[in-house]
Amino acid sequence: MMNSWYGFLFILITYLVFLAMRHVYDRFRMPLFNPVATTTLLIIIGLLLTDISYDTYMLGGWWIQELLGPAVVALAYPLYHQRGKILRYRVPLIAGLFSGIVVGMVTGFIYVKVANLPSMYSSSFLPKSVTSPIAMEIADLTGGIPSLAAALVILSGIFGALFGPSLMRLLGITHYLGVGVGLGCAAHGIGTAKAMEYGEEEAAFSSISMTLSAILYALILPVAIHYLL
């Protein structure tokens, strides 16, 4: 019974902190005030100051994590609504997906080789560009640490949402296809949430990029890890 109350309490705290940080972001519209990043930081500081363990927090955090699946499924709506444009741009969409996946995998393998990471940590790091549930499964299958893989996915998503828009402006990427594919491939769920701020078209392309890249990563990455690490 006590665990249920702890779970409810941590869900409520997380939700209220996120609402507050989203209000701050809506007011100032600065990338550094991204609500996912600021909420994560405040929750970490709060747990450290109160000496509450991660396992205790996850009594409620687990339920929030479980909502990720339905949230991803709900992205089917903008996909369906924008199906005509998806079919029209299928060639550049596939090209963008392919290049994003190749770059993500190659740079990941180069990093773990240069850093000389142990196999366990390499297997946790390499799924960083996939949405959390799939990254955790890949890490588990390849001998990595699922919780570490999830943390790295969230970290890469936050960095993508923080710096992706500025980088795309610097490179002159303004078309909704480029914005959506870039955020979806590089920053998965958090990037797709950022793409929604641009518009439904960007959100649709980001959603399909996140979904298809996750499927391809799930098929290719375990085999690549087995033979290349």
Image (spheres, rainbow, N blue to C red):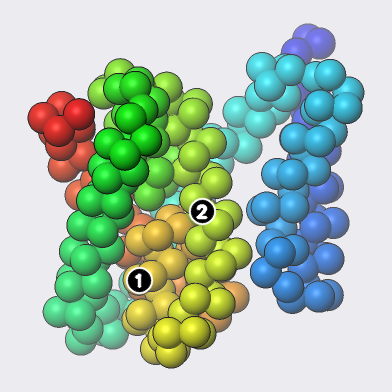
Residue with the mark numbered 1: 181
Q: How many marks?
A: 2
Q: In the shown orientation, is residue 213 left or right of residue 205?
A: left
| Mark 2 neighbour class, 10 Å CA radius: few under 14, some 14 to 19, many 20 or more | many
Q: Which mark is residue 157?
A: 2
Residue at figure coordinates x 45%, y 58% from the top left:
187
Task: Compare residues 34 and 211 and report the one nearer the observer.
Answer: 34
Q: Quadrant of residue 159?
A: bottom right
Mark 1 packing: few (<14 Cα in 10 Å), some, or many (20+)?
A: many
Say which residue appears at 74% left-offset and 17% top-offset. Answer: 53
What residue sits 66% from the left and 53% below the top? Answer: 36
Tell me the kind of residue under disc 1.
Answer: Val
Q: Amino acid at mark 2?
A: Gly
Q: Position of residue 111 (x, y in %)?
A: 33, 43
Q: Left or right: 164 with respect to 22?
A: left
Percent of width and height locating residue 72: 44, 52
Residue 25 sits in which quadrant?
Answer: bottom right
Looking at the image, which is closer to me, 170 or 218?
A: 170
Of the numbered discs 1 and 2, the one sitting upstream in the chain is: 2
**The C terminus appears in which quarter of the rendering?**
top left
Looking at this rendering, what residue extends furthest in the right direction? 50
Residue placed furthest toward the top: 1
